Image (cartoon, helix red, strand yellow):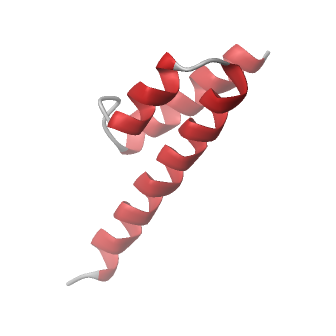
Amino acid sequence: MKYARSTTLIRQLNHGSSINHPWIKHGLSMTQPWKCIFLYLASLQARLKDSARTVQP
């Protein structure tokens, strides 16, 4: 279950940003609870970048 959820998150991240994001790579190399936290932080950072891009003219 946990694994399926994290792969779904990776697909969502990959849709918005590159899977080569260093935080994602770092998160994937780590063991469970930390992996979820790093993936979450990476998704937040990607979302912030996207919103910053849309705000700037």
State the residue lying farthest toward the right: 1
Left or right for 47, reference 53 = right
Q: Is residue 43 above or below residue 11?
A: below
Q: Please state if 34 lies on the left or on the right of 12 as rendered.
A: right
Q: Residue 54 sits in which quadrant? A: bottom left
Viewed as shown, does residue 20 lie left or right of 32?
A: left
Answer with the quarter of the image where residue 3 lies.
top right
Above-or-below relation of 10 to 15: above
Q: Where is residue 5 in the image (x, y as percent from the top left)?
A: 70, 25
Give the image location of residue 52, x and y in percent: 34, 73
Q: Quadrant of the C terminus?
A: bottom left
Query: Residue, x 48% and y 17% (percent of image)?
Result: 29
**What x and y, as percent, mark residue 8?**
60, 26
Taking 56 as reference, is 5 above or below it? above
Q: Among all residues in the image, which is located at the extreme bottom?
A: 57
- In this rendered view, identify the residue nearer to me: 27 or 44: 27
Q: Position of residue 11 (x, y in %)?
A: 49, 28
Tell me the quarter of the picture where residue 53 sits: bottom left
Residue at 69 percent of width and 20 percent of height: 32
Number of numbered discs overlaid on the protein picture: 0
Residue drawn where x is 79% and y is 15% of the image: 1
Q: Which of 28 and 16 is in front in this view?
A: 28
